[in-house]
Image: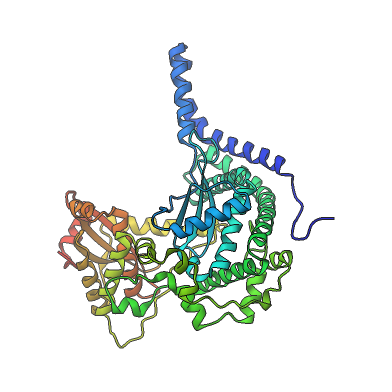
Amino acid sequence: MKPKGTETGIAPVWLALVALAASFFHQLMLLVPAALVTVAPAAVFDNWLFWGAGVLAFLLMAWLAQPSWHGAPQRLTREQAPRLYARVDEMTDVIGAPRLHAIAIDDSINAGALEENRGVSLRPTRRVLILGLPLLRLLDTAAAEAAIAHELGHFSRRHGRLGHWLYRTRAAWTAWAASVREDEEDSSPWDRAGANFAELFLPWFNRASEAHSRRCEFEADALAAKWASPEALAHALLLIEIALMRQGGASTSLDMEALRASGEPPAQWADEPVKELVERPPTPEEITEALRHRQPRGSHPPHRQRMEALGVVGESLDLRPPAWEESAAAQWLEAAWPELCQAQGPWAGAAERLMWTMAHEALRSLDAGAPRVLPELPELPASSDEAAWRRLHRRQAAAQEAIEHGRIQPCELEPSQVEALRRAVSVNAAIVQAWLFDVPVEPPTVAVVLRVDPERMIAMKLTLEQVATTLALTMRLVLPAERDWMPRFSYMTEGLPPELQARVDATPRLKG
């Protein structure tokens, strides 16, 4: 009889062979055009030196073309978190998992088991436990240990050996298909052939690989329940799920009152999920939804099935978050907590801090008595709606072309909106000059033409893309919900197209 909390599917060894074959085929599809270039001289001159150089060049490109699907989360040193490391070391030894190489943190309400350099690499595999700072604030030590034990269970059962290839293969072919969908008209027959294979292969492979991933989750749950208790793990799973539901269901996680009050972003951002759950405790309806899970067929099983496997009635759990003193954050990271929050939060980067400050200045200049509701971001088409994506790209290209050729009009925003933008742009020292225009496209679009000082930009540790990022929140606050916007950047050291320069010369500046 099948054990409770498991499911059947393709055997791991066969799934591994399919993943390896599909990953190799992806590399082959990427490199065949390059191979034609590298071996062409050898075919023409028929010389062993050319053949050797061509083969070496091809192998080098194959090595460099290996994708990396993970970022680089911030590492915690043992000096920063001695209590956390000591506890995890103890848990690792008892559970029978291999020792970790590092513990890392991020800004998520989640935990993860990352194996760096897994796959075809000359470097040794490094095991990294990733813990979200909001997660450590949300859970007490018992629930946090259960969540950590679950991740250590993945290391103990060596789930990453196959999981790496499953994830890599899925991501590679999904990215190939998506890139062709975004620009099908300009894609080559070779690219379209790869996309056709992906569309045939991925539905079956996703079902098979996700079934294996769900089996791994049940195995890790069983190990975590032995270390902690079934109730502690169930508490962690449901509290995390409800916090994520609250976060995803909100139109924005931005604290508008905090934005009005200060030009500096809040440091204690990791407390927000806890505050939300204290002010509005989970309702029976939310608990039912969390047990149903929003991913009924995915890499993780529905929580109802996980509760049944643990022998826990989810509805009977007390899902209140702990006070600060009882949280895992306080117990394991108390001294380092403020510094870690400051460095890891959503407003930690130079561009993000500047985006907050600019939006604060814009908000201050708007009518303080009028209620401000942050407009929703424009809804992007579904990934499967190729026609909608093509229409979106055509609209963006039309707006960009109109700006480049000077087919733009004086901006018709309200004076208060223009003043808000003026005050926001004045804060950004990298922006030397700025103008506003209306672009005659649908939906109505505001063009922000900006000239940037490259030396100031480098001194502020910003890229040109990040300078655009600094404007994003301000534009959402100031523009009416039905209007879009588009930046047009240039350095002070370069000129503008003649038609655009003529419109700029005839238009009052927003700055400079």
Identity of the residue drawn at 19% across and 61% down: 429
Choose between 420 and 319: the one closer to the eye. Answer: 319
Identity of the residue drawn at 34% across and 72% down: 266
Asked if residue 84 lies left or right of residue 374, the reply is: right
Asked if residue 481 lies left or right of residue 85, the reply is: left
Choose between 276 and 413: the one closer to the eye. Answer: 276
The number of numbered badges drawn on the structure is: 0
Horizontal and vertical percent for residue 390? 48, 55
Outermost residue toward the bottom in this view: 369
Q: Which quadrant holds the C terminus?
A: bottom left
Outermost residue toward the top in this view: 47
- Whether residue 14 is situated above or below residue 487 in the rendered picture: above
Choose between 485 and 30: the one closer to the eye. Answer: 30
Identity of the residue drawn at 33% across and 61% down: 469
- Whether residue 289 is situated above or below residue 42 in the rendered picture: below
Outermost residue toward the right in this view: 1
Horizontal and vertical percent for residue 114? 53, 50
Horizontal and vertical percent for residue 19? 64, 41
Identity of the residue drawn at 26% across and 79% down: 364
| Quadrant of res 260 | bottom left
Horizontal and vertical percent for residue 264? 28, 71
Choose between 56 and 485: the one closer to the eye. Answer: 56
**In this orientation, does residue 51 appear?**
yes
Asked if residue 370 lies left or right of residue 228, the reply is: left
Q: Which quadrant holds the N terminus?
A: bottom right
